[in-house]
Amino acid sequence: MRTVAMPADANAYGDIFGGWLMSLMDSGAGLVAARRAKGRAVTVAMDGVEFHKPVKVGDEVSVYAEITHVGRTSMVIATDAYRRERHSEEDEIVTSAKFTFVAIDDAGKPRAVDI
């Protein structure tokens, strides 16, 4: 996923709110989880969140997610966010976390990941 950090997402100093960034990372990890589960999957945990560097208004933010473990009903997805200054070619990691998702059925009950 890729987006631009906007003023509405920042504090008075121009730093992007951590919650906004975590939401973006959750969305990116959720896309990977839904594809692997071939259906609905929900976030049940977020572990090891590390904010390495701040994100500023105008930065391009990219989120990358990779499945690191698949259980019977759950998946762990390592997710990293990078920033790139608007007029730069180089990016740098700003946040990392591990998200755990559980595949669920239409009734909201856990189901096997492999259908």
Image: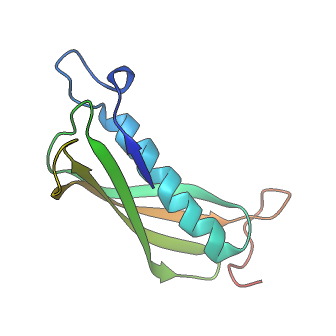
98 and 39: which one is in front? Answer: 39
Residue 58 shows up from this direction: yes
Identity of the residue drawn at 77% across and 62% down: 109
Residue 43 location, x and y as percent?
Answer: 55, 55
Identity of the residue drawn at 62% across and 76% down: 36
Residue 84 location, x and y as percent?
Answer: 22, 49
Rendering quarter of residue 85 = top left
Q: Is residue 58 above or below residue 61?
A: above
Left or right placement of residue 113 versus residue 92 in this view: right
Identity of the residue drawn at 35% across and 28% down: 6
Residue at the extreme top of the image, as rendered: 12
Identity of the residue drawn at 21% across and 33% down: 56
Left or right placement of residue 74 versus residue 64 in this view: right
Left or right placement of residue 82 versus residue 26 in this view: left
Q: Could you tell me which quadrant the C terminus lies in?
A: bottom right
Q: Could you tell me which quadrant the N terminus lies in?
A: bottom left
Rendering quarter of residue 74 = bottom right
Q: Is residue 114 above or below residue 32?
A: below
